[in-house]
Image (tube, rainbow, N blue to C red):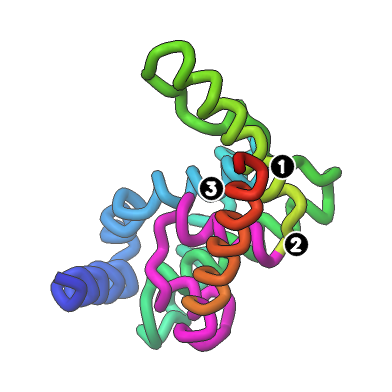
Amino acid sequence: MQMTQTTDELTLVRAAQADVQAFGALYDRYVQRVYRFCYYRTNNKADAEDLTAQIFLAVLEALPRYRQQGHFAGWLFSIARNKINDHHRRVSHISLDESTLPPLHADLEIKVEISQRKERLMKLIQSLTEDERELIHFRYVAELSFAEIAQALKKNEDAIKKMLYRLIARLKDKLEADYE
């Protein structure tokens, strides 16, 4: 399935490089993921919308220079990462908070317990380094594959896997220690 997706992606990229009108298919394929990534990094709907537009404009302008080395999504999200970092340099840092997570549907007791755990997890995530938070955002917000993250961060795929697995294990250990 990954090969088909990569082949489809490559076909879309080549079509967009040949005809700017074909860029819409790439936009449609990635706009929600890019927007979610921007929103979770800024916690602001207007900023996320503006950044998403800026990112796709930058991608469209740079598309003729894209050489299909790796995954298009990795290249796209490296541009997104740079745009978001530029945005953060211009404005004060806005962190994630509990309101960014989807509402839960469970009975009250479970909701309270989950809310407390979620609050603790958010505090733990906020205590991470910017690079560690970004890794979580790439994987779980933007839903990038390890290969795509590796390309976006210009690192080895195995190193990305190890970093993420160790980070998740560390967060899990800290959460479990709180509830023992």
Q: Determine the residue positioned at 48% across, 50% down.
A: 141
Residue of label 1: 123
Q: In which quarter of the image is residue 66?
A: bottom left
What type is the residue that disc 2 sits on? Thr
Please tell me whether the stretch drawn in magenta is mainly helix, strand or loop. Answer: helix
Q: Determine the residue positioned at 46% across, 63% down.
A: 60
What type is the residue that disc 1 sits on? Lys
Q: Determine the residue positioned at 47% across, 60% down.
A: 139
Tell me the quarter of the image containing the C terminus. top right
Residue 35 is one of the magenta-drawn residues: no
Disc sitting over residue 52 in the figure: 3
Instruction: Relative to 169, say whether 176 is above or below.
Output: above
Q: How many marks?
A: 3
Q: Distance between the residues labelled 2 and 3?
A: 24 Å
Mark 3 or 1, nearer chain start: 3
What type is the residue that disc 3 sits on? Thr
Disc sitting over residue 129 in the figure: 2
Camera-side residue: 171 or 101? Answer: 171
Q: Is residue 11 visible?
A: no
Camera-side residue: 55 or 35? Answer: 35
Q: What crowding class fits label 1: few (fewer than 14 Cα within 10 Å), some (14-19), or many (20 or more)?
A: some
Instruction: Where is residue 31? Give x, y as percent.
Output: 40, 48
Chain part drawn in magenta: 131-160
Camera-side residue: 29 or 99? Answer: 99
Instruction: Where is residue 52? Give x, y as percent.
Output: 53, 47
Q: What crowding class fits label 2: few (fewer than 14 Cα within 10 Å), some (14-19), or many (20 or more)?
A: few
| Mark in front: 3 vs 1 | 1
Q: What crowding class fits label 3: few (fewer than 14 Cα within 10 Å), some (14-19), or many (20 or more)?
A: many
| Mark in front: 2 vs 3 | 2
